Amino acid sequence: MSFEPFKNVYNLRAVAEASRKPCDFCFKPTTAVLITSDGSSDFFYTCETHLRDSSFATPIYSEEYKKALEGKTALEGEIKFLKQKWEEKHRYGNWEKIMSYASWGSKDNKIECQDGGKNGKKDKADEPPKDPEAKKLDDLTTKSNDYDTVLNQKQKVYELNKDIFKIRLDKKFKKFIQAKAANPVNPTDTTTSVTRNANVNSDYTNIKDASMFPSVPKNTIK
């Protein structure tokens, strides 16, 4: 099992436009930052376009997203069935509907619209009741749109592709080795190599040297 000093879970944040920096991969200026879930172990600047590439990273969806997706999928079949049923039922229309279309532009109808109620509108009580199937279809469509609102929200938690994550681990370990080289082991130290290696892993997991890492952006992306 490979040694991983931090989890492959990154939160998406954003800095102010004036603080943008080059993307770590394509070097284009960006305000988007990915930072490990612990808030300190690793972070890097990246273009948001990379986040839409599954070979770079994949979203870690929230429970709210999963429930919305499940609800949306369930509704799609029911909406499709109701639409087909309604269209079949009203394919040719009925006599009253045809006559209402024919009389809509008549002179008598125009006079009735002008004299009936405020702004020429008919009383709602005079309007025919809405088709129950059409009403149900409207209700389901509204609910489906509510699910879309959740599904279209910007994702804020990501898992890096294993190769991208390895690049991050290698980069962090390289900095760690450089820091260790700047402070070599005392030749008179009697600590065994096994113990020293164990200490290296422990030190790498709990790096505290502020000079090795710039300050972490605090802004939360919207």
Image: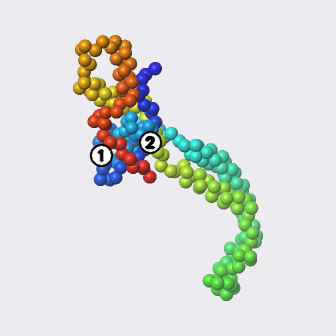
Q: Earlier in the sequence, mark 1 or mark 2?
A: 2
Q: Residues within 10 Å of mark 2 (few under 14, many from 20)?
A: many
Q: Nearer the viewer, residue 46 or 203?
A: 203
The answer for how far apart the CA atoms under marks 1 and 2 are is 18 Å
| Residue located at (74% from left, 61% from top) | 132
Quarter of the rendering containing residue 11: top left
Q: Which mark is residue 29?
A: none
User: What's the coloring here?
Assistant: rainbow
- Measuring from the top left, give residue 31's x and y in whole percent: 35, 48
SS for dot 1: strand
Left or right, 76 with respect to 195, comes to right
The residue type indicated by label 2 comes to Asn
Q: Which residue is mark 1?
A: 21
Q: Nearer the viewer, residue 160 or 205?
A: 205
Q: Residues within 10 Å of mark 1 (few under 14, many from 20)?
A: some
Q: Nearer the viewer, residue 147 or 125?
A: 147
The residue type indicated by label 1 comes to Lys
Up-down relation of residue 90 to residue 97 (above or below): above
| Residue located at (67% from left, 87% from top) | 115
- Residue 54 visible in the shown view: no
Tally of marks: 2
- Measuring from the top left, give residue 110's x and y in whole percent: 65, 84
Left or right, 104 with respect to 41, comes to right
Q: Which residue is mark 2?
A: 11
